[in-house]
Image (cartoon, rainbow, N blue to C red):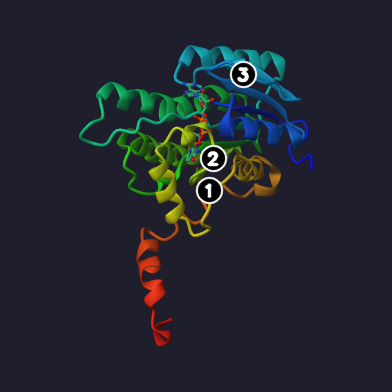
Amino acid sequence: MNRLQGKVVVVTGAARGQGAAEAAACAAEGAHVIATDAQPFATETEGVVQRTLDVSRDEEWAALADWLRHAYGRVDGLVNNAGINRRARVGEVTVADFDRVQAVNVTGPLLGIQHLAPLMPPGSSIVNIGSAAALTGHYPVAYTASKWALRGLSRSACLELGPRGIRVNCVHPGFIETPMTASAAPAFREANLRETPLGRSGTVAEVAAVVTFLLCDASSFVTGADIPVDGGLTSHGGTKSISDALLPDLPEEDS
Ligand code: NAD
């Protein structure tokens, strides 16, 4: 559709999963895409330039910003997608694991905004990839705390960058089929689907579609928003199991 024709878009954590799909979707919309990741890329995508970047490292962001300034002179879009999980609960999580999750999931996006916002003209857009865990109490504490913090960062950045015409939004995926969720216990998947009104998992393409919308000018008055892409997972506040439990026995007059 070319909604991002000629725009320069940086995507982090783009070697696989949602990041790879977001990079490909932006390229399909006509953007010059710079796909970055800490791990090597297994495949090439047309229209996508690949660069190494550990989002938690300030000096690597500085080097990327320098290269972008020389190569393109500006950045129109940033997708802070890279994220990691540690599936430990409050009583078990180590401080080292807690800190590493914050470093990648929160400090990474902060550094990205600090280094790339100076290159952004009015009309630019930043999309931070949160999670259903950013909208609920979720059992992996480091991950949940980091994604709630990312929402706070997004709101502060929205306030600060708004006067420059730069938008900042958060997308919150539910259960999406990626290598991250493939490594979870089968019970985690089943429980997620039970709590999801649409009754299925999501695809990376369904997340990428919302990300490209937020990057393009069709969303020019949308900023500071939290947008779930979760099949309704976070919409019911935990009441789906109550609804489901009562459904078979519901008397006609109560329905
Ligand atoms: P994934 O694990 O499949 O891919 C994550 C990518 O991030 C990998 O390529 C990895 O190498 C990269 N990465 C990790 N640490 C990095 C670092 N320090 N610097 C740069 N890159 C790094 O995960 P995914 O499922 O595609 O998740 C993408 C984003 O969506 C994450 O922020 C995740 O928290 C979020 N999310 C995913 C789901 C889901 O169901 N899959 C749900 C909610 C939120």
State the residue position of label 3.
Answer: 41
> Is any part of residue 195 visible from this angle?
no
Q: Nearer the viewer, residue 55 or 186?
A: 186
Q: Residues within 10 Å of mark 3 (few under 14, many from 20)?
A: some
Q: Secondary structure at mark 1?
A: loop
Q: Nearer the viewer, residue 232 or 104?
A: 232
Q: Residues within 10 Å of mark 1 (few under 14, many from 20)?
A: some
Q: Secondary structure at mark 3?
A: loop
In percent of the image, x 26 and y 29: which residue is there?
93
State the residue position of label 1.
Answer: 201
Q: Is mark 2 within 8 Å of ligand 1?
A: yes
Identity of the amino acid at label 2? Answer: Glu
Q: Earlier in the sequence, mark 3 or mark 2?
A: 3
Q: Position of residue 121 (x, y in %)?
A: 65, 31
Q: Secondary structure at mark 2?
A: loop
State the residue position of label 2.
Answer: 177
Q: CA distance from mark 1 to mark 2?
A: 7 Å
Q: Position of residue 91 (x, y in %)?
A: 20, 34
Left or right placement of residue 124 versus residue 245 in this view: right
In percent of the image, x 30 and y 37: which residue is there?
141
Q: Position of residue 77 (x, y in %)?
A: 63, 32
> Is any part of residue 6 visible from this angle?
yes
Quadrant of the image containing the N terminus: top right
Left or right placement of residue 168 versus residue 6 in this view: left
Q: Earlier in the sequence, mark 1 or mark 2?
A: 2
Which quadrant of the structure image shows residue 186? top left
Identity of the amino acid at label 1? Answer: Ser
